[in-house]
Amino acid sequence: MGGAVLPLPATLRPPAATTSHRPARMESTEPGLPLRPGPVLPVVLPVLVLPGPRRPMRPESLRRDPDLRQELAALARGCDFVLPSRFKKRLQAFQQVQTRKEEPRPPPTSQSIPTFYFPRGRPQDSVNVDAVIAKVEHIFAQFPHERATLDDMGSVAKACGCPLYWKGPLFYGAGGDRTGSVSVHKFVAMWRKVLQNCYDDAAKFVQLLMSPGCNYLVQEDFVPFLQDVVNTHPGLSFLKEASEFHSRYITTVIQRIFYTVNRSWSGRITCTELRRSTFLQNVALLEEEPDINQLTEFFSYEHFYVIYCKFWELDTDHDLFIDADDLARHSDHAISTKMIDRIFSGAVTRGRKVQKGGKISYADFVWFLISEEDKTTPTSIEYWFRCMDLDGDGALSMFELEFFYEEQSRRLDAMAIEPLPFHDCLCQMLDLVKPCSPGKITLRDLKQCKLAGVFFNTFFNIDKYLDQEHREQAALLRENDSDGPELSDWEKYAAEEYDLLVAEEAAGEPWGDGFEAELSPVEQKRGALCSSLAQRPFPESPLGDVELYEFACGDDDLQPL
């Protein structure tokens, strides 16, 4: 071959080989002839590495293997490597041994942690269910055919160990509303189930009134219970002659219950919320207190009378709804228009009709009036905080405070009163509230501040702002820190307004809304009313048959804070 041979690169050259010279084999050209010597050729011998004696594979010596330790050290430095097959085998053997050495751990027992959550109350071993059922059966044996009507349920409630005015929930919980009476077998089955699953009064009350498939109470669930209170409580006997006001009173009480008890703003009262409130204690007091007006937290008729009369003054067309212009006339236009707009924006209203018709119902007005006249309760602070929180970020910024104070300043200028510059007013409010985070005021800050009402009035109520400016801050603190059974701001307001309304009616002074002839529809019935409250007037609505609790909020209208 006559061409030149290209040299191989160093990396592709064959490994060095050892050469040895030995005599070449004798070549034979013909069979039978002796071999003849040929040329001497180099012989390439491969380098063979003979393995040493194979040691038994011991997983315990795996970590002491120097080769493996070097490769593991290289891996720790970020180098990639591939374990040889012998190392893989040794690793597998080591893992198998370690797996055999590990013993299975016993599963943790649930008895190690005691039960601490009792959504239906803590179980009590002292309750003898059979003894309670025996008492109930003894009471039912006294009724004709062992069937009890609603009028008979008072003694049944006592046999069950419940307050008297649980008779309505017990009757309706056993299905008495469908047949007009309850058999002993059906009631015993119902009450045994309640006793076996509910262990405190809050859980039992919710179980009796809630709708099937629910574990909470909505507003409609309270209607049968409150209707029985209206029909049978001696302090409300005068309302029997004015049945058109039953729905008004029931609506007012329901809104006050949810205003105080439903702290989550969800429109659903759970066992936990009911357990934390004083509602069931007030229900028990209905039996002991013949004067309904002494139960000022929920059931007072005088408070209902004040709320309804205030609503009637604003509702000029008497369609049971008021718009922004109507609400702005409350307290002689004391509340700023910006705050009125916020109320109608849906920040605190719970009805879908607000967004459609731009009006709020009587149920919404109950929340507004109580929040306006008493800004010290947690619900009222949440109410006005939601209105002032324009962007809904859970904090009041300096921009939002200036937004509301701007209208206050213009109204003070119109009254020839020099307002404080916003910067000075802001410094006063920050010193008053003492927020935890600079530059913003949170709901927690306002709840911890004892003068939240002063803060809110400064930004959207001109009359109360001027009134508090004439009083020293120390006097305001003394009013809030006073010990003893002091009346709340709402109770003071309701008592004063009720006296004024009764005095105006006694003097024959009209309310000035153009409907004087309709304000006293039961004048002819006053002589028939035997209660001490018989002389109290009843404002009439031309829509007397409308059930106001139909306009109450739905379950999903309240959004949690």
Image (cartoon, grey):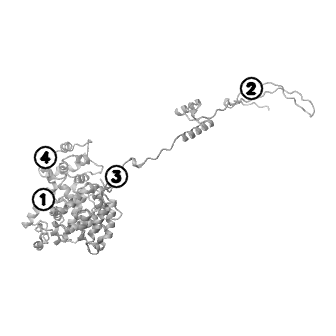
Q: CA distance from mark 3 to mark 4?
A: 41 Å
Disc with the residue nearer the chain's start (1 vs 4): 4
SS type, badge 4: helix
Quadrant for residue 182, please give it: bottom left
Q: CA distance from mark 1 to mark 2?
A: 121 Å
SS type, badge 1: helix
- Give the labeled residue for mark 4: 478
Q: CA distance from mark 2 to mark 4?
A: 111 Å
Identify the mark at residue 495; answer none if there is no mark: 1
- Image position, residue 413 (x, y; %): 14, 50
Quadrant of the snapshot with the N terminus? top right
The residue under the point 16% across, 72% down is: 241
Q: Report the front residue among 487 and 317.
A: 487
- Give the labeled residue for mark 2: 18
Q: Judge whether 477 appears above or below 48 on screen.
A: below
Query: Amino acid under label 2?
Result: Thr
The residue under the point 15% across, 60% down is: 294
Q: CA distance from mark 3 to mark 1?
A: 42 Å
| Residue neighbourhood size for the residue with mark 1, other residues' Cα within 10 Å, grouped as few (<14), some (14–19), many (≥20) | some
Query: Amino acid under label 1?
Result: Ala
